[in-house]
Image: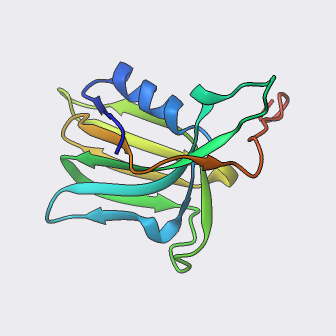
Amino acid sequence: MGPVLLAEDEEDLNIISAQLQDAVARVGDLVYLPRARRFAGLFNRFRWEDCDDAKGHDLRVRTGLHFDGVLAAKSHNLRRDDPDAVVELLAIQFVPGRDSAGVIELLFAGGGAIRLEVECIEASLRDLGGPWPAVARPRHDAGAGQ
């Protein structure tokens, strides 16, 4: 297993978001555990930190993400009826509320989202195994959304 990245504030969460940009997951691997007040997900993360344009070595790695102190979770535009549907994570953002509470939003390609109502930012990210060659490097249309 790899080192753990922890997030306890918005700046930390932005680092985790950058690490997970273009990660893919099965909808069935994204779960809310209300009794434990935890949201957890398994992703295949693109290792942007290892990209080398000259060598063309692009890698992915299995990664676990979880948030604690989750009071509620809601999804929008995700195929919850199809656990094998694949989603691509674009970003994670925090919308502050009162005190340290707020909403963490996981934003997916195609307009999907998961909104987590949290007591505070308490997140953990860890690579769970060794990397493997990526089929392709994610591409972003510079004009998208404009």
List x then y, in percent, for residue 88. Answer: 62, 52
Please, is residue 88 above or below residue 92 in the view?
below
List x then y, in percent, for residue 4. Answer: 30, 35
In the image: residue 81, left or right of residue 8? right
List x then y, in percent, for residue 112. Answer: 59, 55
The residue at 29%/40% (across/down) is 124
Please, is residue 136 above or below residue 97 in the view?
below
**Residue at the extreme left of the image, as rendered:** 35
In the image: residue 39, left or right of residue 94? left
Please, is residue 76 above or below residue 127 in the view?
below
Q: Quadrant of residue 52?
A: top right
Q: Quadrant of residue 41?
A: bottom left
Decide which of 80, 126 is in the foreground and name it.
126
**Residue at the extreme top of the image, as rendered:** 11
Total labels drawn: 0
The residue at 83%/34% (across/down) is 141
Looking at the rendered image, the quarter that the N terminus falls into is top left
Decide which of 45, 81 is in the foreground and name it.
45
The residue at 44%/66% (across/down) is 29
What sort of colour scheme is used for the picture? rainbow
Looking at the rendered image, the quarter that the C terminus falls into is top right
Q: Quadrant of residue 57?
A: top right
List x then y, in percent, for residue 23. Answer: 57, 47
